Amino acid sequence: MAKRWSVVCVALAVVFSSGAIVCQGEPQAEPAQPKMGINLAGPADWNTELPFVDVFKLSRPWISQQKGKPWGQGPRLDLDEHGWVRSLQPDCWAETLMCTIDGGHYPSGKYTVFYDGKGKIEVGNAARIVEEHPGRLVIEVDSTKGAIFLRITQTDPADYVRNIRVIMPGFEEVYEKEPFHPDFLKRWAGVRCFRFMDWMETNGSRIARWEDRPLLEDATFCAKGIPLELMIDLCNRQKADAWFCMPHLADDEYIRKFAQLVKDRLNPELKVYLEYSNEVWNGMFEQSPWAGEQGIRLGFAEKPWEAAWRYTAWRSVQIFRIWEEVFGGRDRLVRVLPSQAANPYVSEQILSFQDAYRHADVLAIAPYISMNIHSSGNGPTAEEVAQWSLDKLLDHVENRSLPQAIEWMKRQKEVANRFGVGLVAYEAGQHLVAVGDANRNEKLVELLK
């Protein structure tokens, strides 16, 4: 089974470059080595990638608690500009969770907790304090017990508890110089491009100005995303190109300063992929109706979805021009116009609007393979699929889902060729999920695990 599934996955291999997408279904004498990229998982306390040795950086935003009240129903917390608790009301405390991962997925052992300021920190659930000193704790963690709980029960408003770091075993002497966990770096060694869509919290982003951006000093990266400095440092460390998704609300000053920091800090041998937001054509994301409203206001179209496509093209070109000005040209830039894999018409609309294709290098799509499972209607239903054997499921993927995805790629390649741009994938892989309430079918869930 594993060999058969790997064949299906290889057939979906795509090239992250300004060249053409590679269709493995067509014979090639000397197949080029695919330049593969990866989308990194977004910051969350349940993130299983564990990118940082300081697990507090992926802690849940503070939860306000009050004695005698239900969980999370304490008063509004007094936070500073970086999210640290400045003061607490009587009988109140601030609490957070880290590593909410089942099955002992994260390391057990002695973690070191560093902090600045004066106050009292307690831990619980999977952790207990075994050493306590001003500004430093040593906690024993048993990951089989679930999440690490940390709470501030006292803090001095004149010198409040801040800059908390919870360092995994063995990294307390090196975490400041090497923030990335070596297992994380090893896992993605050889990846040629990192797309930071989720690290930037792109979908539904509230970032509009440069002052809104996440900073290294922030209490947690789970509030606004991971700072740009760390994204650049990861690319430099791994010798991988960077793929940035510019927030849909971002003004020109944000774009310019973002580009300047990248130019100043990123290895000059690495390229930068530029994309406006993420899937603005997709109505399930907040940026889609917002872009539709802007497009209608500018007179691009009357229908909101068409206005969103055209606004994507228009704003993308503006962003490309700003980056070209900062970088003094476009040699290091890969200018991306994104579209819907299954709909070449959307691609044509985006590429052609105000000749956007003349300012772009690639068309980007996400050619997932899927089961096309529905509660009812076209395609197999959840009830039908739940009765299939694993062999029959793989037959469906190999004989129907995969050819469909390849056909999407071929049609999009024709569009890209017509407009003189390359074709890349911003996402791809398996989408073996059910639509709507079909995912509540227990047999289907077991089959697709």
Image: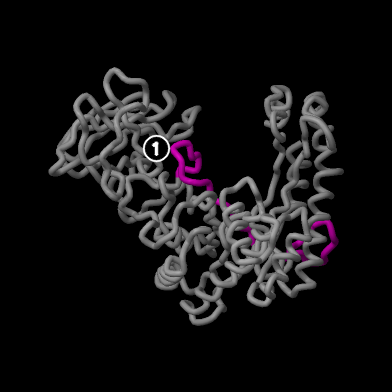
Seen at 39% across and 31% down, the residue is 108
Q: From what the image shows, is residue 395 above or below residue 265?
A: above
**The magenta stretch spans which residues?**
21-50
Residue at position x 69%, y 60% in the image: 302
- Per the picture, the main secondary structure of the magenta-coloured stretch is loop
Which residue does the numbered mark 1 point to in the structure image?
A: 60
Q: Quadrant of the N terminus?
A: top right
Task: Judge by depth and name the residue closer to the eye, 440 or 21.
Answer: 440
Q: How many labels were placed on the picture? A: 1
The residue nearer to you, when weighing 1 against 327, is 327
Q: Amino acid at mark 1?
A: Arg
Q: Is residue 124 left or right of residue 8?
A: left
Q: Residue at x 44, y 25 (%)?
A: 144
Name the secondary structure under disc 1. Answer: loop
Answer yes or no: is residue 363 visible.
yes
Mark 1 surroundings: few (<14), some (14-19) or many (≥20) residues within 10 A: many
Residue 36 is covered by the magenta coloring: yes
| Viewer-closest of 287 and 323 | 287
Residue 330 locus on image (x, y percent): 56, 78
Q: How is the image coloured?
A: one colour
Residue 105 lies, with reference to residue 289, above or below; the image says: above
Query: Residue 26 in the image: x percent, y percent?
Result: 84, 60
Q: Is residue 380 magenta?
A: no
In the rendered image, residue 181, in percent from the top left (x then y), is placed at: 42, 48
